Image (spheres, helix red, strand yellow):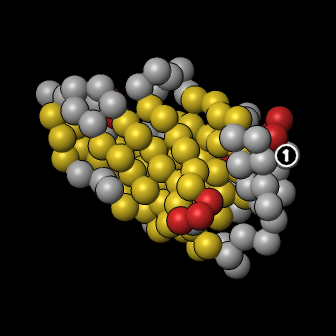
Amino acid sequence: QVHLMESGGNSVEAGGSLRLSCADSGYSYASVCMAWFRQAPGKEREAVAVIYTGDDSTHYADSVQGRFIISHEKAKNRQYLQMNSLKPEDTAMYYCAADELLLQRRCLEMAIADFDYWGQGTQVTVSS
């Protein structure tokens, strides 16, 4: 059973940076699709970034492209989301997610329904 737990959420001013971390464990497959999603109050959960660990290919939502970086450190069983140049519209609950059965092409589509495993979320608040 895969377990995910996020940390690193905080309140920051616009223009600041945060690094979210997701501790992961229980994978049975060597290549895994890992992602970050977010959900703001009153809005639907949306994809932020994804990484396919088989070849470290990544994909980002247009809204965070160039500001956020997703990465994975297999030795520490962690995935990260480095968030730079934060904006008030980045305020949301951030969730890490994973799925072991997605191949690279499908993984990079970041379809929320494809992910079987989810963390509990960590809150990011960006003030103007």
Asked if residue 107 shows in the view, the reply is no
Amino acid beneath label 1: Leu
Furthest residue toward bottom: 1
Q: Which quadrant is home to the N terminus? A: bottom right
Residue 16 sits above or below residue 107 on the image? above
Q: Nearer the viewer, residue 98 or 72?
A: 72
Picture mark count:
1
Residue 78 sits above or below residue 50 on the image? below
Q: Is residue 77 left or right of residue 125?
A: right
Q: Residue at x 57, y 51 (%)?
A: 72
Q: Nearer the viewer, residue 86 or 79?
A: 79
Q: Position of residue 107 (x, y in %)?
A: 75, 42
**Mark 1: secondary structure:** loop
Q: Residue at x 39, y 51 (%)?
A: 20
Residue 106 sits above or below residue 123 on the image? above
Q: Residue at x 70, y 35 (%)?
A: 57
Q: Position of residue 71 (x, y in %)?
A: 55, 44
Q: Is residue 70 left or right of residue 114?
A: left
Residue 97 sits above or below residue 2 on the image? above
Q: Which quadrant is home to the C terminus? A: top left
Q: Nearer the viewer, residue 114 or 6?
A: 6
How packed mark 1 is, by other alpha carbons closer than 10 Å (few <14, some 14-19, many 20 or more), is: some
Q: Position of residue 115 (x, y in %)?
A: 70, 55
From the image, tell me which residue sits under label 1: 103
Asked if residue 31 shows in the view, the reply is yes
Q: Position of residue 66 (x, y in %)?
A: 46, 21
Q: Quadrant of residue 3?
A: bottom right
Q: Is residue 123 left or right of residue 22?
A: left
